[in-house]
């Protein structure tokens, strides 16, 4: 279960990072 949890955690963190990055983009807010 360790590898599965690690991968899931990383996937969630990367997804959240991408979403936050998109929200912080100036052009995304303008559009």
Image (spheres, rainbow, N blue to C red):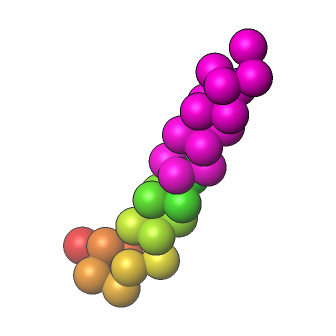
Q: Which residue is drawn at 54% across and 60% down?
A: 17
- In the rendered image, the vertical position of residue 30 relative to residue 13, given as above or below: below
Q: Main secondary structure of the magenta part?
A: helix
Q: Where is residue 26 in the image (x, y as percent from the top left)?
A: 36, 85
Q: Where is residue 3 in the image (x, y as percent from the top left)?
A: 66, 25
Which residue occupies the extreme right position in the image?
2
Q: Is residue 22 magenta?
A: no
Q: What stretch is highlighted in magenta?
A: 1-15
Which residue occupies the extreme bottom position in the image?
26
Viewer-closest of 2 and 23: 2
Q: Which residue is drawn at 60% across and 43% down?
A: 10
Q: Which residue is drawn at 47% across and 77% down?
A: 24
The N terminus sits in image quarter? top right
**Quadrant in the picture for residue 8:** top right
- In the rendered image, the vertical position of residue 24 relative to residue 10, given as above or below: below
Q: Position of residue 16 (x, y in %)?
A: 56, 52
- In the rendered image, the vertical position of residue 30 relative to residue 19, given as above or below: below
Judge from the rendering whether residue 24 lies leftward or rightward of residue 12; answer left or right: left
Judge from the rendering whether residue 7 lies leftward or rightward of residue 24; answer left or right: right
């Amino acid at each position: 279960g360790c590898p599965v949890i690690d991968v899931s955690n990383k996937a969630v963190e990367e997804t959240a990072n991408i979403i936050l990055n998109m929200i912080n983009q100036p052009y995304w807010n303008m559009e």
